[in-house]
Image (cartoon, grey):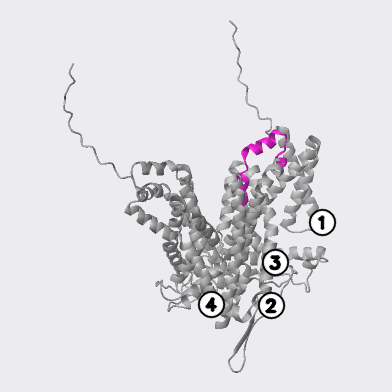
């Protein structure tokens, strides 16, 4: 049989499409815009450092290292109108550290207990409401904490301070030169405690809830009680996250302004007697001095703001490192 | 042929508390309460706080005795852990309850219609409440929030899109910077706007500058929440979009963002809740004003947080009453936003 010679209709073979990874124009624009905006964080942070440095530069130059180590804050205008000034942040930095440490020391156990309760003990129905309460706590404005701290917490806390002073007054930090207990670093620390509890709790809860289930079940299978399981599995696993969360709380505590200002008597003297009505705080000092600041003093306050800015940046950086490392190790 | 007998095992829960366990728990709590009341009555302790602490200590002791007989030392430690964690949660709840109760209780005293409609033009904070109000401050706060939204929401959401959709080379750096930015103290944000704009340009304190300062504080919150919800959008949706031949831009604009819409609204509202009560930056950038100012570019502006602040600084009973009533108004604003954010947030979770 002869081969059928049917002329197949000539098919137009399409040209091979050029395969390219070059995005379309619309995509290029999209990527460009999004990428440009994503750098806004970088731009803002750099601008903050640059402008505060420009405004505070004279202070850094005049005061030198004394700006960090000195503990005087005086401006003096002589009869010729020449302004001489000494600015030192030591008392304020020490005060900030003292108050924040008090806050972290009290807040960490409370937050870890709450986080453990939420993750392992709370019944499902209650859990939902508790999480809402803690989220709500994070959304309260800081001036609300200031008002509450001043009018509600302080009267109670003064009584507690008196008790602590009575029983532990022989320890230096609980001693007081005069029996005045209001507006002390202790009370400011308590207000900050309340403010940082939601941060530490939510970070700890997140880390605890990522504990590998097989390890939990292994612990139970070996006969552990719930607490035995938590101690052997959850706490070692989540320790890093708790540390990181505490440092995030510390960063927040460093920068808190209005709430601390409401309940602290700011005095330029390094004071470690936490129950006494003398304390320091960089952020609150800036607010306090701002009202009647001379131009020169404004520069010094800008410099103080820069110091505070870098302090919180460093603490936050370390905290995020610790948290992300812990969270990664669980996966 | 033998018939195989199968019997379904009834599931048991040997770990569930038996009736006896529950009875013991109730008994121990009751005993602890009775002892608590007795001890507080006999000793010179006073106030609610000792009741509270003593109850936990007594409950633990009573319960430990019961548990020790049944389960030994391990059981006691287990019981202690359960009670201590409960203690932590109760303390936190008590603090929140105290804050809410005191604010509502003290704030309600000064609330009347005039309070929401009047201004402080002819009234000072040292006058008793009744004449004058905070309407101008509400307007001012809304204006500040609107300005902050205009700047912060595009910035935040686009940054989140970069981190979730483009995942460019700088993603790690941007992530780090956003985290760093969330730690910027509010006072520094205010100082920065003052240093950069008020000292360098003819612009003076106004709602616009306040909105800029608040933007700095709002961007990280919006970014982080948006990033979370964008990550929840299933990969399949993106791949389906791209497989249908859509460009990345079309996929993001028509698939990813609509899928995450309610979550993005949540992110915005959470950002607003974060900044609505900020006080410190406003003191540097907005100033205070006692009447309406509808010009966002020029002139000082009243706002709720600064009214509270001045009331607190005033120190007289009247000004403090002003502070409590105003903070109640502010708290209501924050609570409403919080509830709306929750509603949108749960909708997103459900659809996932």
According to the image, label 4 marks what residue? Answer: A55
Q: Which chain hosts label 2?
A: A
Q: Distance between the Cα atoms at labels 1 and 4?
A: 60 Å
Q: Secondary structure at mark 1?
A: loop
Nearer-the-camera pick, A108 or B44: A108
Q: Looking at the picture, do discs 1 and 4 lie on one chain?
A: no
Magenta stretch, overall SS: helix
Of the two numbered discs 2 and 4 on the same chain, state the one appearing first in sequence.
4
Nearer-the-camera pick, A89 or B131: A89
Q: Distance between the Cα atoms at labels 1 and 3?
A: 35 Å
Q: Looking at the picture, do discs 2 and 4 lie on one chain?
A: yes
Between circles 2 and 1, the one closer to the viewer is 2
Q: Which mark is residue A98?
A: 3
Local packing at callout 1 (Cα closer than 10 Å; few below 14, some 14-19, many 20+) is few
The residue lying furthest to the bottom in this view is A80
According to the image, label 1 marks what residue? Answer: B43
The quarter of the displayed image where residue A34 is located: bottom left
In the image, which residues are magenta?
A: A202-228
Q: Which chain hosts label 3?
A: A
Local packing at callout 2 (Cα closer than 10 Å; few below 14, some 14-19, many 20+) is many
Task: State left or right for residue B103 relative to residue B333.
Answer: right
According to the image, label 2 marks what residue? Answer: A71
Between circles 3 and 4, the one closer to the viewer is 4
Of the two numbered discs 3 and 4 on the same chain, state the one appearing first in sequence.
4
Q: Secondary structure at mark 2?
A: loop
Q: Which chain hosts label 4?
A: A
Where's residue A147, x and y in %?
61, 66
Check if mark 1's residue and mark 4's residue have beta carbons within 8 Å.
Answer: no
Task: State left or right for residue B259 relative to residue A307.
Answer: left
Q: Looking at the picture, do discs 1 and 3 lie on one chain?
A: no
Task: State left or right for residue A249 relative to residue B300.
Answer: right
């Amino acid at each position: 049989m002869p081969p059928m010679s049917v002329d197949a209709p000539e098919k137009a073979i399409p040209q091979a499409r050029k395969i390219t990874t070059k995005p379309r124009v619309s995509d290029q624009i999209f990527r460009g815009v999004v990428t440009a905006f994503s750098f806004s964080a970088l731009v803002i942070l750099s601008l903050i450092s640059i402008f505060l440095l420009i405004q505070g530069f004279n202070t850094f130059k005049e005061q030198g290292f004394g700006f960090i180590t000195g503990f005087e804050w005086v401006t003096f205008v002589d009869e010729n109108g020449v302004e001489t000034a000494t600015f030192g942040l030591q008392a304020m930095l020490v005060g900030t550290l003292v108050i924040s440490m008090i806050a972290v020391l009290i807040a960490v156990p409370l937050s870890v207990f709450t986080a453990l309760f939420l993750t392992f003990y709370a019944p499902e129905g209650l859990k939902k409401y508790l999480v809402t309460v803690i989220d709500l706590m994070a959304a309260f404005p800081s001036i609300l904490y200031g008002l509450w701290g001043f009018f509600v917490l302080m009267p109670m806390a003064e009584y507690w301070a008196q008790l602590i002073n009575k029983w532990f007054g022989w320890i230096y930090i609980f001693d007081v030169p005069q029996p005045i207990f209001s507006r002390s670093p202790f009370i400011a620390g308590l207000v900050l405690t309340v403010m940082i509890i939601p941060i530490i709790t939510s970070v700890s809860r997140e880390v605890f809830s990522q504990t590998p289930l097989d390890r939990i079940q292994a612990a139970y299978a070996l006969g552990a009680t719930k607490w035995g399981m938590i101690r052997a599995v959850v706490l070692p696993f989540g320790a890093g996250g708790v540390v990181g969360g505490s440092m995030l709380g510390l960063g927040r505590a460093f920068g808190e302004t209005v709430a601390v200002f409401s309940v602290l008597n700011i005095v330029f003297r390094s004071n470690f007697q936490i129950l006494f009505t003398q304390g320091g705080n960089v952020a609150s000092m800036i607010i306090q001095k701002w009202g009647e600041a001379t131009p020169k003093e404004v520069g010094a306050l800008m410099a103080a703001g820069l110091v505070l800015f870098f302090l919180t940046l460093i603490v936050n950086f370390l905290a995020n490192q610790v948290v992300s490392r812990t969270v990664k190790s669980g996966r | 042929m033998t018939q195989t007998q199968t019997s379904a095992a009834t599931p048991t829960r040997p770990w569930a508390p038996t009736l006896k366990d529950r009875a013991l728990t109730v008994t121990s709590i009751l005993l602890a309460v009775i002892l608590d009341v007795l001890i507080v009555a006999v000793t010179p302790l006073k106030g609610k706080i000792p009741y509270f602490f003593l109850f936990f200590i007594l409950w633990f002791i009573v319960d430990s005795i019961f548990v020790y007989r049944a389960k030994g030392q391990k059981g006691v430690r287990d019981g202690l852990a359960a009670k201590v964690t409960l203690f932590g949660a109760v303390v936190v709840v008590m603090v929140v309850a105290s804050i809410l109760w005191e604010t509502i209780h003290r704030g309600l005293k000064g609330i009347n219609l005039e309070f929401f409609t009047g201004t402080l033009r002819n009234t000072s904070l040292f006058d008793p409440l009744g004449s004058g109000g905070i309407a101008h401050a509400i307007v001012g706060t809304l204006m500040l929030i609107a300005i902050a939204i205009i700047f912060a929401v595009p910035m935040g959401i686009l940054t989140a899109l970069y981190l979730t959709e483009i995942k460019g080379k700088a993603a790690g750096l941007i992530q780090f910077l956003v985290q760093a930015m969330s730690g910027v103290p509010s006072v520094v944000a205010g100082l920065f706007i003052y240093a950069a704009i008020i000292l360098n340009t003819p612009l003076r304190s106004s709602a616009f500058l306040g909105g800029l300062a608040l933007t700095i504080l709002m961007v990280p919150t919006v970014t982080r929440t948006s990033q979370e919800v964008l990550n929840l959008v299933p990969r399949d949706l993106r791949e389906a979009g791209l497989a249908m031949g859509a460009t990345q831009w079309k996929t993001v604009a028509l698939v990813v963002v609509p899928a995450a819409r309610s979550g993005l609204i949540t992110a915005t509202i959470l950002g607003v809740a974060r900044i609505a009560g900020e006080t410190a930056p406003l003191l540097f950038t907005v100033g205070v004003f006692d009447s309406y100012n509808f010009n966002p570019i020029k002139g000082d502006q009243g706002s709720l947080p600064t009214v509270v602040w001045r009331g607190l600084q005033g120190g007289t009973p009247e000004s403090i009453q002003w502070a409590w009533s105003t903070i109640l108004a502010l708290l209501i604003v924050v609570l409403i936003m919080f509830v709306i954010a929750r509603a949108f947030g749960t909708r997103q979770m459900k659809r996932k």
